[in-house]
């Protein structure tokens, strides 16, 4: 390959590449973009097609030129290897996160003082997706099991609070652990038979499971209220309510403590509890990846046959990852339900699963920091770019494909601290 | 009366099942050759629905209104353009990932699926689209107290699907291209040592799969008349169910699985409850994968080091 580096740039090849790409783009985009159906007739839109084809041709031309430069050749060679394995840090490496994590905690504590209600809701949504991303990250990133029906466990959590209140009179605090247990049980029941078999099938089974849950929620009118959804009670703390007037026989918190009524108080409360839960989950996950079970997840992801030869019970190890991921989604569901005050099946479509998967993929499979950043970027950015809202799904799709081509292991590479025998210990 | 409903649902099921079978071929061939679930296949089918409506509209504008020419022109147009879609998708999203991690192509396929849905929605609008009825009328058989109705469109669908499958079976069994496909499916590395351009064979397989989905798209559009940008998702999972039911990687299995799933689903919605027919199909998928993952005609998977 080294002789190829000195080759002059072949302009003719690039032009031919660009023309071929342009022709293909014309065939692909021409009918769908250029001819817009209108009843049984159609309207012609030649300008849009021309722009798209020109963009494709220019892009292909530049790409073709770039791939002929030494740097491009190196990238092409990079496709040959699989880039597998885990990056191990030096034993005495000190992460910069030592400084960043306390800083973030301080920002998170100070934030509610300055935030208005809108900012608070956006950040709550971001934190809910952090929770979902962390949960799916255990399943997809660490254990390497592709779960396309993750939203089903989220729905179980959310409906667990809503229906639990309606039929059993459960509140926010009792629903929180119960929903996590219910989601974990569902994950266990689904996972146990499925995890024994070939990995790709898991993706489809979980996808089918997610759709089944959504369809049942949608069609079982007597129990779940169908597409109209179910109202969710506002959270309380020690029987104190956040409303202006007491509804469920409690005392409004502002009357109890004797301060001015503040309508944002409910969101402040959700923010505070959610922040604590996210911190706890972050810590638990951090510890888990250093425990034998966490090591076993990553080892199974890298080579299942070798692990089984070493005597790991692959079903139990996978099941533990699947169940933990599911219970995290159940927790997130409870927060989502009380944040919205209402749940309906439209919040739990396949797109939601794809969004959470995009968070995990973008953040780097297995990387905790990456997932937190990606969750905020993917949930807060659409709020800022309201005018591009209709292009959001398109951008997610393009992002997923490009990420897989460019860096299949995510933006932030997972690394593991190295170990060294202590001094003074006999070998 | 019961017999009438049963036979009617049987016919509806055969129509639906032959469509599932056609789409399932795309899943099963791609899985057989590169071991990947082509998640975007359902959306390729959805694109072909739009293409067939566009083809019909353009051809009617040129004053072609005799049924054979109209349907032939639409079929050729849709199959060619959808085939190019299959080719381009493979080149852009899957080929660079040939040596990547196992999850990468699957995630990339989900990305393509999102792209196709949103791209069609943005360019064609999100409302339902439709085509006029092309073939009116049908046969009606009296059986006992009830009757069974077979419209010309349904008969055409069953016949066209079987012709399509027969042509494909001939190609795979008796032509040079088919031999190359089978060789690549058995052992990709060995095939490339023996001088087969496996990258090209993989491209052909994607084109064939897309073309079969295009045939299904034209037939479904003729029968039901309406579709939207979200149409590919549900039918894609069902076609995948059909492919798994028949044994993934096996061509006759895909056709058989499609027919069985179509009939089972129609009988379920006719006799039990039509609200839960999707739940029934997905539940069937989960049960098959748990209890007989190799399907009816497939070989059991053996993990190799």
Image (cartoon, coloured by chain):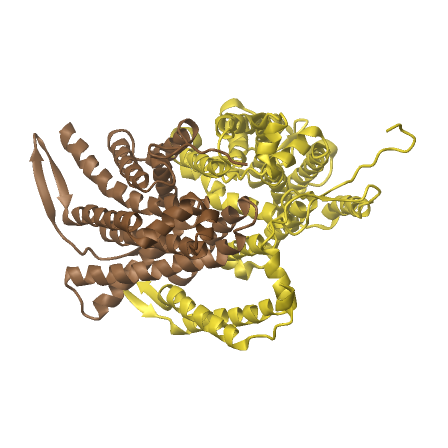
Chain colours: A yellow, B brown
B305 relative position to B19: left or right: right
* Residue A348 vertical position relative to residue A310 in the rendered view, above or below: below
Left or right: where B175 falls relative to A68: left
Q: Position of residue B87 (x, y in %)?
A: 41, 58
Identify the residue at image location x=21%, y=60%: B72
Residue A40 in sight from this viewpoint: no
As rendered, which of B120 and B73 lies closer to the eye?
A: B73
Left or right, B278 with reference to B39: left
Compared to B238, does A156 lie above or below?
Answer: above
How far across and down, in percent of the image, does residue B205 sit? 38, 52
The answer to which of B284 and B268 lies nearer the viewer is B284
Residue A75: x percent and y percent?
62, 60
Q: Position of residue B56 (x, y in %)?
A: 25, 62
Quadrant of the image occupied by residue B143: top left
Residue closest to the far right: A424
Quadrant that contains the C terminus of chain A: top right
Residue at horizontal 23%, vertical 47%? B166
Where's the N terminus of chain A, which quadrant? bottom right
Is residue A224 visible to us here? Answer: yes
Furthest toward the top, the residue is A168
Height in image: A195 above or below A64?
A: above
Q: How many marks?
A: 0
Q: Nearer the viewer, residue B294 or B3?
A: B294
Q: Residue at x 54, y 61 (%)?
A: A387
* Residue extending furthest toward the front: B194
């Amino acid at each position: 390959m080294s002789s190829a580096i000195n080759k002059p740039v072949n302009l003719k090849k690039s032009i031919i590449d660009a023309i071929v790409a342009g022709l293909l783009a014309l065939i692909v985009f021409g009918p769908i973009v250029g001819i817009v159906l209108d009843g049984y007739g159609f309207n012609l839109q030649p300008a849009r097609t021309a722009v798209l084809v020109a963009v494709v041709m220019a892009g292909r031309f530049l790409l073709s030129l770039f791939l002929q430069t030494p740097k491009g050749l190196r990238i092409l060679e990079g496709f040959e290897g699989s880039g597998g394995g885990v990056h191990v840090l030096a034993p005495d490496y000190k992460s910069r996160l030592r400084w960043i994590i306390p800083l973030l905690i301080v920002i998170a504590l100070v934030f509610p003082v300055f935030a208005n209600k809108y900012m608070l809701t956006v950040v709550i949504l971001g934190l809910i997706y952090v929770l979902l991303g962390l949960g799916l990250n255990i399943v997809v990133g660490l254990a390497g099991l592709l779960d396309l029906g993750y939203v089903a466990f989220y729905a179980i959590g959310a409906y667990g609070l809503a229906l639990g209140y309606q039929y059993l009179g459960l509140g926010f605090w009792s629903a929180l652990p119960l929903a996590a247990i219910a989601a974990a049980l569902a994950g266990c029941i689904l996972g146990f038979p499925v995890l024994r078999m070939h990995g790709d099938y898991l993706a489809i089974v979980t996808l089918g499971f997610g759709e089944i849950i959504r369809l049942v929620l949608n069609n079982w009118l007597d129990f779940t209220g169908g597409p109209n959804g179910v109202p969710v009670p506002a959270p309380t703390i020690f029987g104190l309510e956040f409303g202006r007037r007491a509804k469920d026989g409690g005392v409004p918190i502002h009357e109890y403590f004797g301060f001015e009524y503040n309508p944002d108080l409910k969101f402040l409360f959700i923010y505070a509890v959610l922040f604590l839960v996210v911190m706890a989950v972050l810590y638990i996950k951090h510890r888990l990846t250093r425990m034998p079970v966490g090591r076993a997840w990553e080892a199974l992801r890298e080579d299942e046959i070798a692990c089984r030869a070493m005597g790991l019970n692959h079903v139990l190890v996978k099941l533990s990852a699947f169940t933990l991921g599911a219970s995290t989604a159940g927790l997130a569901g409870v927060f989502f339900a009380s944040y919205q005050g209402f749940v309906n099946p439209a919040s739990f479509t396949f797109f939601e699963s794809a969004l959470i998967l995009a968070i995990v993929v973008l953040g780097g499979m297995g990387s905790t920091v990456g997932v937190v950043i990606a969750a905020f970027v993917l949930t807060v950015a659409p709020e800022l770019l309201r005018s591009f809202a209709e292009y959001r799904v398109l951008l997610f799709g393009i992002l997923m494909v490009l990420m897989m081509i460019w860096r299949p292991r995510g933006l932030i590479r997972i690394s593991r601290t190295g170990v060294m025998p202590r001094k003074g210990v006999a070998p | 009366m019961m017999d009438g409903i049963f036979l009617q649902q049987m016919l509806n099921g055969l129509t639906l099942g032959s469509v599932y079978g056609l789409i399932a071929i795309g899943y099963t061939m791609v899985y057989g050759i590169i071991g990947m679930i082509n998640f975007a296949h359902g959306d390729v089918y959805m694109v072909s629905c739009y293409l067939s409506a566009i083809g019909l509209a353009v051809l009617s504008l040129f004053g072609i209104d005799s049924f054979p020419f109209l349907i032939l022109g639409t079929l050729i147009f849709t199959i060619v353009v959808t085939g190019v879609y299959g080719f381009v998708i493979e080149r852009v999203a899957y080929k660079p990932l040939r040596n990547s991690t196992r999850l990468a192509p699957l995630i990339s396929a989900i990305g393509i699926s999102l792209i196709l849905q949103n791209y069609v929605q943005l360019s064609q609008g999100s409302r339902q689209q439709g085509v006029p009825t092309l073939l009116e009328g049908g046969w009606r058989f009296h059986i006992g107290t009830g009757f069974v109705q077979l419209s010309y469109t349904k008969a055409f669908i069953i016949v066209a699907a079987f012709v399509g499958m027969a042509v494909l079976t001939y190609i795979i069994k008796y032509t040079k291209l088919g031999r190359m496909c089978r060789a690549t499916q058995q052992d990709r590395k060995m095939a490339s040592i023996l001088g087969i351009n496996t990258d090209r064979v993989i491209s052909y397989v994607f084109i064939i799969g897309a073309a079969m989905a295009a045939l299904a798209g034209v037939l479904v559009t003729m029968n039901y008349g309406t579709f939207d940008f979200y149409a590919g998702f549900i039918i894609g999972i069902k076609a995948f169910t059909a492919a798994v039911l028949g044994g993934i990687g096996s061509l006759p299995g895909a056709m058989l699985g499609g027919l069985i799933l179509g009939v089972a689903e129609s009988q379920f919605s006719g006799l039990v409850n039509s609200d839960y027919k999707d739940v029934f199909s997905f539940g069937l998928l989960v049960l098959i994968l748990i209890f007989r993952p190799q399907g009816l005609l497939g070989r059991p998977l053996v993990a190799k080091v």
